[in-house]
């Protein structure tokens, strides 16, 4: 089970369900509950949110370039970080070979896609 906070459940629902394509399993006054490839993701309603300065959720994908292009076409903006050599799509290749791209949800939580 994974958790992430939101101050705007309607906006978070549209992002996680419609943009990322996760299946909404439940919606109640406390949280939105999604199925993320067999892992429960609870997007919890909070009054205050100070997004962490690091990745809080990530997904492994078979082809990070295709995934990035698909999400970019849906309006997702990928993050760029000074000092990190990222390609035209914003993908960074780690020293071990993993390819990673970062983006934010509507609340400013940092999310990632990784191809190992």
Image (cartoon, helix red, strand yellow):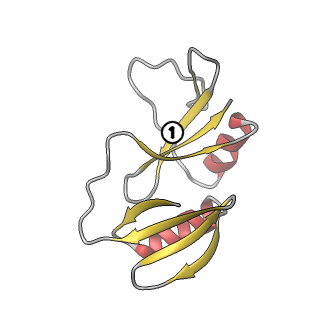
Is 37 on the left-hand or right-hand side of 79? right
Residue at left offset 37%, top offset 39%: 54
39 over 93 or under it: above or below: below
Badge 1 crowding class, 10 Å Cα cut-off, few under 14, some 14 to 19, many 20 or more, is: many
Image quadrant containing the C terminus: top right
Q: Residue furthest bottom?
A: 29
Q: Quadrant of residue 83?
A: top left
104 over 100 or under it: above or below: below
Residue 51 place in picture, x, y as percent: 31, 51
Residue at left offset 58%, top offset 31%: 100
| Residue occupied by mark 1 | 102
Of residue 62 and residue 68, the one placed in the foreground of this image is 62
Residue 44 place in picture, x, y as percent: 40, 70
96 over 23 or under it: above or below: above
Q: Residue furthest top?
A: 95
Q: Residue furthest front?
A: 1
Residue 86 place in picture, x, y as percent: 54, 23
Residue at left offset 30%, top offset 70%: 46
Q: Quadrant of residue 98?
A: top right
SS for tag 1? Answer: strand
Q: How many marks?
A: 1
């Amino acid at each position: 089970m994974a958790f992430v906070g939101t101050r705007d459940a309607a906006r978070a629902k549209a992002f996680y369900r419609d943009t990322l394509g996760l299946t909404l399993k439940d919606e109640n006054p406390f949280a939105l509950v999604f199925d993320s490839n067999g892992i429960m993701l609870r997007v919890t309603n909070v009054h205050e949110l100070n997004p962490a300065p690091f990745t809080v959720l990530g997904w492994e994908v078979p082809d990070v370039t295709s995934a990035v292009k698909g999400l970019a076409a849906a309006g997702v903006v990928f993050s760029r970080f000074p000092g990190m050599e990222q390609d035209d799509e914003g993908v960074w290749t780690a020293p071990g070979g993993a390819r990673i791209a970062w983006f934010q949800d509507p609340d400013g939580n940092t999310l990632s896609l990784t191809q190992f």
